[in-house]
Image (cartoon, rainbow, N blue to C red):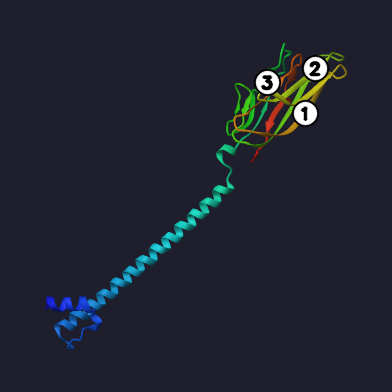
Amino acid sequence: CPPSTAFVLLCLLHGPSDVELAPGSGEELWLRSWKVSDARSNDAQQRRAAAKGAGQELSLQRRCISNLASLRRPSPAGRAAFSVSLLKDGGFRCIGPFGGDEVVIYEHVFLNLGGHYNGSTGVFTVPQAGLYTFAVTLHSDAGAPRSPLAACTGLQVNGRVAAEAREQNADDQEDSATAVVLLQLNAGDAVAVKLLKGCFLCDESHYNTFSKTHKSTM
């Protein structure tokens, strides 16, 4: 039979350990069942707490691993590299000379990681401040021996010349030149190759190229 209300209140006030009962009485049996139930409840609480702690530790480990992985990956803004050449097809063609400096539009795109090189304008837009390495190779053909050769380009940043590659002579029907430069640039800077006034480029097999390697952020 269930214990009296007074007995239950006594257990709650003094604790089951302080209550003395006759062996085999209904109150003693109920109290024994209560202790077992209470022990099971405490054990379940401890298991839940342990599981919660383990779950929190696992979550912390996953966050740490994720943070380390993100540190090793370059940011999307930093993923910028490209390599382009003058002509898309394999036929022989020349551009220039012009009456003034003109941006060279490189038609064939080998690589445009990050999409920061614009194939329509010939301009690379700097996505993030840092150090950038550019390489420009030019090639031209005077058309006949002893004809004047004028192959000259300028790598420009925001309209100002940063480096030049130039071959001007009457000794070689064909010639080439390469300029490689390391620049510290800011986000939003516009970098392009310009064909300088009076000069011309000729190509038939990706001789004229413009490239930028991966960068280091500052």
Residue 110 in the image: above or below residue 143: below
Tell me which label, 3 or 2, sits earlier in the chain. Answer: 3
Q: Position of residue 31 (x, y in %)?
A: 20, 80
| Residue at image mark 2 | 150
> Considering only order in the chain, which callout, 2 or 1, is on the residue closer to the N terminus?
2
**Residue 113, quarter of the rendered image:** top right
Using the image, determine if residue 39 lies above or below residue 101.
below
- 9 left or right of 206? left
Percent of width and height locating residue 60: 47, 57
Residue depicted at 51% across the width and 55% down the height? 64
Under circle 3, the secondary element is: loop
**Residue 105 visible from this viewpoint:** yes
Q: Amino acid at mark 1?
A: Thr
Q: For the residues labelled 3 and 2, say whether their Cβ atoms are less than 8 Å apart.
A: no
**Quarter holding the C terminus?**
top right
Tell me if residue 205 can be seen: no
Residue name at image x 61 percent, y 21 percent: 121
Tell me the element at label 2: strand
Which of the two discs, 3 and 1, labels the residue nearer the N terminus?
3
**Residue receiving disc 3:** 104
**What residue sits right under mark 1 in the picture?**
178
* Residue 176 image point, x, y percent: 79, 25
* Residue 150 rendering spot, x and y as whole percentages: 80, 17
- Circles 1 and 2: CB atoms closer than 8 Å: no
Helix, strand or loop for disc 1: strand
Quarter residue 140 falls in: top right
Q: Kindly identify the amino acid type of the residue bearing the numbered disc 3.
A: Val
